[in-house]
Structures are given as C-alpha cells and as structure tokens.
Amino acid sequence: MKNFSWSWSRLKNYRACPKRHYHVDIRKDFAEIQSDALLWGNQFHELVAKRTADGTELPAEIRRHDKWPGTLRDMVERGFDVSVELELAMDRDFQPAGWREWDRTWFRAKVDALAIDGDRRYAVAFDWKTGKAIKPEFEQLQLTAQMLFVHHPDVQQVHTAYYWSQHFTETTATYGKQDMLKLWAKLMPEVKRMEEAHRTTTYPPRPSGLCIDWCPVTSCQFHGKGSKGNR
C-alpha cells in the first residue's frame, strides 16, 4: 500500500464525496472536468506568477489586478524574499519533507505567492482566487501558515490572504504558532478517518447536487443524478 498523504484539496474532496475523492485524487482513473473557468484560473495564476517573480507586465486585459503582484515586486526591492508557486511538504512529525518523497511525506500544500521579511520573523502568503463566489476557507489559510512555520522556523507570524479577482477584494487572516494547536485539534480526527479509509480502501459515495453536472466519475451509480436519485 502506498504511503498515506493528504492536502487541503484532498480533504475538501473527501468531505464532498469519498468515492469521488478516491477516483480523482488516489486512483486517478477519472480527471477533473476542465471547464472554461478552471482553464482561465490556471492561466491567471501563470500570468500573476510571472509578474511577481520577474516583473513581466500583466496583459492589458488583467492589468487592473496588479495591486498585489506589484506590491510583491516592491517588497523585493525592500529586501523581502519573494517566491511563487511553492510546493511544500512535511512528514508526520511536522518536519520538512520533499514534495516527491512518496514514502515519507504526510501533508502537502501549495502557496501561490510568499514574501518573508529580511529578518525572517514574519511572512505574507497569498492565494489567488478566480471563482465567482467569495468563500473564504480559513482552514486552508491556517494550513498554509502551519507549513510556513515548519519550513521557516524563525518565522513567528504569518499574514495570509485570499485575493478574489472577480471582486477586486481580499480576505485576510494572521496566525501565530500558538494558533496551530486549535487547528489540529479540529482536523486530526477527520484526517485519521481519511487514513483509515485509505488503509481499508473504503470510499462510499455521498450523493449530492454535485452529481448532476460536476462529477467526472461516470461509473458511479449516482452520476448525473441529484441527491435523491433524480434530476
């Protein structure tokens, strides 16, 4: 059996439907539906990453989103260590691990943009969101903070933010190391259930309205149906 590992997206998918999570995230015999919105989101991330990393100007049609990428470029000039599209991982002992250390890594997280001050005492992490709705998920921001505390032990405080591109606004939250205990008290029972599902390969379907149009697992008995089995 492969080593159990998880991420925020896997936890979300497991919550929504264990069977879908199994096929999309673990077995990978079905892929996410590549909607126009998803493709645009990927392109937006690429363009903003280039702007942040090396100063490449944003295309005219999205230049109005330059507030935070431009700010991050300014932070480079002020001595901040700025990185983009980071893939970070840790093991069960909350020690840094490699993204592809398949036998050791326990949790993985991606950070769209990160800035750490010159004294390495605090960090700022951004997540670019391109969807229509503003739905802040603070657990994800907390997990980002946890990963930064692991990889940068001198950092004492992490300022996190979602940037909602369709609304030109942000949702922010600041975390210290002391805030992590409450996070894990809440999440660990759920993560243990995921691990037991992994051990026993037990992933029952959880039918909902998502089955109608948004699930790629066509082999599921509920595919194309609502939570009560009809459209």
Image (cartoon, rainbow, N blue to C red):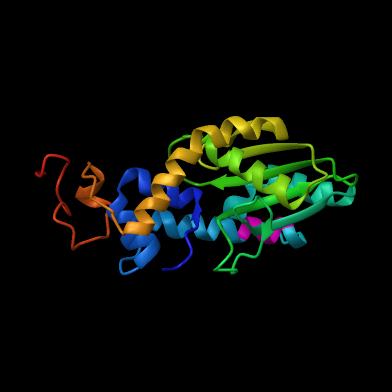
Q: Residue at the location (51% across, 59% down)?
A: 42
Q: Which residues are magenta?
A: 47-52
Q: Residue at the location (59% across, 61% down)?
A: 46
Residue nearest the observer in this picture, 31 or 177: 177
User: Quarter of the image containing the N terminus?
Assistant: bottom left
Residue nearest the observer in this picture, 199 or 219: 199
Q: Main secondary structure of the magenta part?
A: helix
User: Quarter of the image containing the C terminus?
Assistant: top left
Q: Residue at the location (90% across, 44% down)?
A: 119
Q: Is residue 17 visible?
A: yes
Q: Where is residue 62 drawn, in percent x and y?
A: 59, 51
Q: Residue at the location (35% across, 53% down)?
A: 197
Q: Where is residue 37 drawn, in percent x and y?
A: 41, 53
Residue nearest the observer in this picture, 88 or 185: 185
Q: Relative to 48, does residue 155 appear above or below in the rendering? A: above
The quarter of the picture where residue 178 lies is top right
Query: Viewed as shown, does residue 219 lie left or right of 100?
Result: left
Query: Viewed as shown, does residue 1 lie left or right of 77?
Result: left
Q: Where is residue 195 drawn, in percent x and y?
A: 42, 52
227 in the magenta segment: no
Please identify the residue farthest to the left as the structure is shown: 230
Q: Is residue 69 visible?
A: no
Q: Where is residue 67 drawn, in percent x and y?
A: 69, 42
Residue nearest the observer in this picture, 56 or 204: 204
Total numbered labels = 0
